Amino acid sequence: MSVGKFVRFCAAGFGALAVAGAAEAADLYGGYKDEAVYIPAAVWQGFYFGGHAGWSWSDIGAGNNILILGSSSLQLGTLSNSNIFGGAQIGYNIQAGNFVLGVETDLGGMDAGASGSFVDPGNKSRILYVSSQGGFYGDITGRAGFSLGNALIYAKAGFAFFTGGVKVSDPYDGFGQNSGTFTGWTVGAGVEYALSPNWSVKGEYQYFDFDNGNFSCCLSSTGGRIDDNITSNTFKIGVNYLVHNVRSPLY
């Protein structure tokens, strides 16, 4: 399955989850004359899973370090891309009073495709061609938050990876290089709101720094060195289904 199809599939799944959550919340809460359903104090305790969709703004640092070729040097620029992304998440929370600690894993597709060329000012014949493509991303993060009624304000941070590739070629000097899987870190924050004992919605900002050390290498034939990384600012809307909504054993 291509990344584009995966993202569209996740977006469709996210929409289905959102409709299901809204329907259950409406059934539980009833109309304005009905009494609202009681939600336990430990709203966030237990396992959960769901889907998300949003927008990403990616910068492909096509050689943030100076690329040295023979006796000349070339400072490569940055390529930018913005596009939809989406996927699924699963996690587990422990709630003690108003404090919530947990671990969360995301997996999805992100389009970071961009292309460009950079000319060596000292040698107009030397042109570096750089292109990137979308891929699958994932992360494993710790999550910490504070519960205010049905709302949870939280922050998260941890490990991240991205399978999208970056290709750099220099026909003049006769070399080309392709990146492997990018690995790095991520940090983010968001607000989640419980619609019912089992359904919640969230809005989340997340920053990714994919720094692939495998892409850096010394090119003995030209004396060149390429260092590459991808960074992404993302915002997403998500829906979660809380599997176990029970009182915390830490109470």
Image (tube, helix red, strand yellow):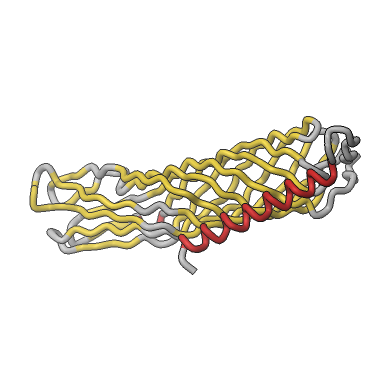
Residue 83 in the image: x percent, y percent?
A: 43, 48
Q: Quadrant of the rendered structure where residue 77 is? A: top left
Residue 33, compared with residue 214, is above or below; it is: above
Residue 214 makes an appearance in the image: no
**Residue at position x 8%, y 52% in the image:** 125
**Residue at position x 66%, y 55% in the image:** 16
User: Left or right: where does residue 47 sit relative to residue 4?
Assistant: right
Residue 158 makes an appearance in the image: yes
Q: Residue furthest bottom?
A: 1
User: Left or right: where does residue 94 sit relative to residue 19?
Assistant: right
Residue 24 in the image: x percent, y percent?
A: 79, 49
Q: Quadrant of the rendered structure where residue 150 is? A: top right
Closer to the camera, 156 or 80? 80
Q: Which quadrant is the C terminus positioned in? A: top right
Closer to the camera, 53 or 181? 53
**Residue at position x 70%, y 39% in the image:** 192
User: Left or right: where does residue 210 sit relative to residue 248?
Assistant: left
Residue 156 in the image: x percent, y percent?
A: 63, 41
**Residue at position x 33%, y 50% in the image:** 227
